[in-house]
Image (cartoon, rainbow, N blue to C red):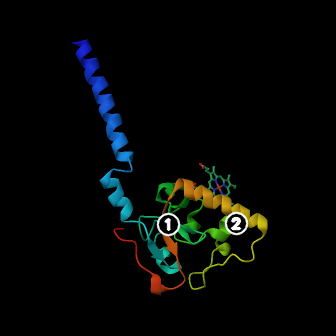
Amino acid sequence: MLTNIIVILVILFFARSIYRDFIANDNNPLANQAEASIVEGKFTPKSLAKYNGKDHPKIFISVKNRVFDVSQGAAFYGPGGPYENFAGRDASRGLALNSFDPVVLTPLDQPIDDLSNLSKLELESLEQWDEHFENRYKVVGTLHENGTVSEEVKGL
Ligand code: HEM
């Protein structure tokens, strides 16, 4: 009797591992479908702004003109989080200067920050943050100057 229970528990354990592998697997069509629906979005600073965890449940931020889905980091970027100012915004200059002060954010009606006046050290800092985001979050699109290329991310 006890042996039977142990055998069943072992089978359940392996079944769970296999299921988890399947969910994590790149070949999983369900995962790919979800991913496919959020790649290649083209944002403008204004269309990005709504992905701030308030106006929309997803949180996106832009770093060096790539848009990352940082919703998993809602504790950082969500309402009341320490870096909430970055939510829905181009965070590049803030990351370069190591500042989450709202004054480092480019106003939404201004051209995208070309970061041309950053020092070598600041650019290096930005580069490291860029790698951090790349390793941790998914890219869901790119940031563009005007609406002609703007296209909302499908399925969000
Ligand atoms: C008062 C000084 C600060 C403290 C104590 C602090 C603390 C932390 C801690 C504990 C983490 C989590 C690290 C991890 O789990 O990987 C973190 C992440 C982070 N911090 Fe700070 N921080 C400070 C200042 C700043 C400033 C000034 C910025 C402005 C750029 C900043 C931007 C970030 C970002 C972007 C993350 C990454 C969050 C993510 O992975 O999505 N921090 N910070």
Instruction: Name above or below for residue 36 compared with residue 13.
Output: below
Picture mark count: 2
Drawn side of residue 42 relative to residue 124, left or right: left
Residue 148, compared with residue 24, is above or below; it is: below
Query: In the picture provided, is 35 more to the left or to the right than 134?
Result: left
| Percent coordinates x, y for residue 1 in the rendering | 21, 12
CA neighbours of label 1 inside 10 A, class few (<14), some (14 to 19), many (20+): many
Q: Is residue 1 left or right of residue 79?
A: left
Residue 60's mark?
1
Q: Mark 2 belongs to which amino acid?
A: Ala
Q: Position of residue 16 (x, y in %)?
A: 32, 35
Q: Please state the horizontal and vertical placement of residue 153, each as a whole percent of the image.
A: 40, 72
Mark 2 surroundings within 10 Å by alpha-carbon count, few (fewer than 14), some (14 through 19), many (20 or more)? many
Residue nearer the viewer, 39 or 60: 39
Find residue 39 and name its label: none
Looking at the image, is mark 2 or mark 1 earlier in the sequence?
Answer: 1
Asked whether the viewer can see residue 59, the reply is: yes
Q: Tell me the element at label 1.
A: strand
Location of residue 110 in the rendering, given as x and y in whole percent from the top left corner? 60, 85
Q: Residue at x 66, y 64 (%)?
A: 95
Q: Residue at x 59, y 62 (%)?
A: 83
In front of the other: 101 or 45: 45
* Extreme residue toward the front, this view: 27
- Numbered disc 2: secondary structure: helix
Quadrant containing the C terminus is: bottom left
- The answer to the question of whether label 2 and label 1 lie on touching residues, with beta carbons closer than 8 A, is no
Extreme-left residue of the structure: 1
Is the CB of mark 2 within 8 Å of ligand 1? Answer: no
Residue marked by disc 2: 96
